[in-house]
Image (spheres, rainbow, N blue to C red):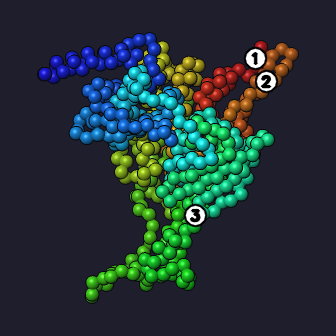
């Protein structure tokens, strides 16, 4: 078959498949919408080709997390990639992850192919969707440290929001915290729940609670305890309560010493990410190892520590955008400071429109490259152009009018940016440098202000004042026990807020849309 005939055959098969998946009807499944909203036209075309040529194989369903695993053939080389799809029942929670190195968009062609295949399985009822039942007296989850991304994976959005409220407004009494085990009593209303979390050597957690939740591995009480530990002590809390004597003795044993010896002036332990590392103070002490006769090992400043990377990625939030939402987020790289929590010296802004080699950076930084790329104006302008009734002229309309867009365009902006900002900020490690560049200051290191993202929900609080002739509207924003006025937001928008040095994201995109609408109405006749 020549290339022209092959192309016609693929086109015909594609039309039949698209009709079957609903693309030629008036109703699109949420999976198909997800593909077309987040993938480029080239990715959609190549992903569809892989799917239509039988290049996707369903492997298994993980009953614990609900993840679906696929094996997808590469359309260019003779290899395969594994794709995992999570929480596929809802467009707002659907995520796909592939092992390939593609980082030029939200979805790669292998993820697109797997999503097409999943949509086909659901239409043909080939997927067993019977929900697993969990006994909260004992469930095990796979997680190395306390990570918001994994916590959300093992529970639902509703239960996660309930856990945040429990953590913020109810009493969590920790009765035991040692040897990687935490026990606590959580009182909600008139009920008290006993919760236990135990980290295992294989970096999994055994969890236990006395509640009756059976739909997900993590109930709101377990999640609330994880959240409290995360907010109070960081993601590596369980490392900090681990008995490190065995590890310390292994490090000292490299030099023929142990904890029972006098280590004064000889060694010192320092902690990084909650783990102990050994520093040799006396340079005359050498490692105990066999050496060839007559060969002396040169003296070196010996430090037993983690592998270092020369560069680290960070974020700068600035106000140099002239159009709504008026803030931008740049990806920058710089040298690590001594404690690896901030940049030292000059930093360099990276062009996310071009390929960035992720191998130069630590593993926890690499996903930031694609996340920052997807929140640039060029990307969400494409999304609005696809979904706005104004189509391709939307950007020209905004360009001519720098004021706030109409309510429909605002909703599209919020619906696109909110989940991506939430995912990006939840991905940040405590060591990721985060800065704010105040308005009017030059783009240089000395102008930057260190800020901190707060993993707490930010809610609008609306108060109506009744007067004889009209009703006044007072708006404030609340997080934990603190509140502030919208005018105090240094970022000048309704989605992302900077209050002092704390960065907060509004709870839901719908809240941002309501705030944008109410901000125009200080009085109601």
Give the CA distance from mark 2 to mark 1. Answer: 9 Å
Tag shown at residue 524: 1
Residue at the left extreme, as displayed: 2
Question: Looking at the image, is mark 3 or mark 2 nearer the viewer?
Answer: 3
- Mark 1, secondary structure of its residue: strand
Nearer the viewer's eye, disc 3 or disc 1?
3
Residue shown at the point (57%, 67%) measured from the top left:
243
Q: Which mark is residue 310?
A: none
Which residue lies under the disc numbered 2?
464
Q: Say what secondary structure mark 3 lies in.
A: loop
Name the one closer to the observer, 48 or 138.
138
Quadrant location of the C terminus in the rendered image:
top right
Question: From the viewer's perspective, is 39 left or right of 402?
Answer: left
Relative to 58, say whether 397 is above or below: above
**Residue 41, quarter of picture:** top left
Residue 446 visible from this viewpoint: no
Q: Is 376 or 2 nearer to us in this picture?
A: 2
Q: Position of residue 453 (x, y in %)?
A: 59, 45
Whole-angstrom CA distance, mark 3 to mark 1, is 59 Å
Task: Name the spot of residue 124 as percent of width and height, x first.
Answer: 40, 21
- The residue located at (44%, 70%) in the rendering is 304
Please state which of residues 13 and 316 is positioned toward the viewer in this rendering: 13
Find out whether the residues at labels 2 and 1 contact each other: C-beta distance under 8 Å: yes
Vertical position of residue 143 compared to residue 298: above or below: above
Give the camera-side residue of 65 and 244.
Answer: 65
Q: CA distance from mark 3 to mark 2?
A: 52 Å
Q: Which residue is mark 3?
A: 242
């Amino acid at each position: 078959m020549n290339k022209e005939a092959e192309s016609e055959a693929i086109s015909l098969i594609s039309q039949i498949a698209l009709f079957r998946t609903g693309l030629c009807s008036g109703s699109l499944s949420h999976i198909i919408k997800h593909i077309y909203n987040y993938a480029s036209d080239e990715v959609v075309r190549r992903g569809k080709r892989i799917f239509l040529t039988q290049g996707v194989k369903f492997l298994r369903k993980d009953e614990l997390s609900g993840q679906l695993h696929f094996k997808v053939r590469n359309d260019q080389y003779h290899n395969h990639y594994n794709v995992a799809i999570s929480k596929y029942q809802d467009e707002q929670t659907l995520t796909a992850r592939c092992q390939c190195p593609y980082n030029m968009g939200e979805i790669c062609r292998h993820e697109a192919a797997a999503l097409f295949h999943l949509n086909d399985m659901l239409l043909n009822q080939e997927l067993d969707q019977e929900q697993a039942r969990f006994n909260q007296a004992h469930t095990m989850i796979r997680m190395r440290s306390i990570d918001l991304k994994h916590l959300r994976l093992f529970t639902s959005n509703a239960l996660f929001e309930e856990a945040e409220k429990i953590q913020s407004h109810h009493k969590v009494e920790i009765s035991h915290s040692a040897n990687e085990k935490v026990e606590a009593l959580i009182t909600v209303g008139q009920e008290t729940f006993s919760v236990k979390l135990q980290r295992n050597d294989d970096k999994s957690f055994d969890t236990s609670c006395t509640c009756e939740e059976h739909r997900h591995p993590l109930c709101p009480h377990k999640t609330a305890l994880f959240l409290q530990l995360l907010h109070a002590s960081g993601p590596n809390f369980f490392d900090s309560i681990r008995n490190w004597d065995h590890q310390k003795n292994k490090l000292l044993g490299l030099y023929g010493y142990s904890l029972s010896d006098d280590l004064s002036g000889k060694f010192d332990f320092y902690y990084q990410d909650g783990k102990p590392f050994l520093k040799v103070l006396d340079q005359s002490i050498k490692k105990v190892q066999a050496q060839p006769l007559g060969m002396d090992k040169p003296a070196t400043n010996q430090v037993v520590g983690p592998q270092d990377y020369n560069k680290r990625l960070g974020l700068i939030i600035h106000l140099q955008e002239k159009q709504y939402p008026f803030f931008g987020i740049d990806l920058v790289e710089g040298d690590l400071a001594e404690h690896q929590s901030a940049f030292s010296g000059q930093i360099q802004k990276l062009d996310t429109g071009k390929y960035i080699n992720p191998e130069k950076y630590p593993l926890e930084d690499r996903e930031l490259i694609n996340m920052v790329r997807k929140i640039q104006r060029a990307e969400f302008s494409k999304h609005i152009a696809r979904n706005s009734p104004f189509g391709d002229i939307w950007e020209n309309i905004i360009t001519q009018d720098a004021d706030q867009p109409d309510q429909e365009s605002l909703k599209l902006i919020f619906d696109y940016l909110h989940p991506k900002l939430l995912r990006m900020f939840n991905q940040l490690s405590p060591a990721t440098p985060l800065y704010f560049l105040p308005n009017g200051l030059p783009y240089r290191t000395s102008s930057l202000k260190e800020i901190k993202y707060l993993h707490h929900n930010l809610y609008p609080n609306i108060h109506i004042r009744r007067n004889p002739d009209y009703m006044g509207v007072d708006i404030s924003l609340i997080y934990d026990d603190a509140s502030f006025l919208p005018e105090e937001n240094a970022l000048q928008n309704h989605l992302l807020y900077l209050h002092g040095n704390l960065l907060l994201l509004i709870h839901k995109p719908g809240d941002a849309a309501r705030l944008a609408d109410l901000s125009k109405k200080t009085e109601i006749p």
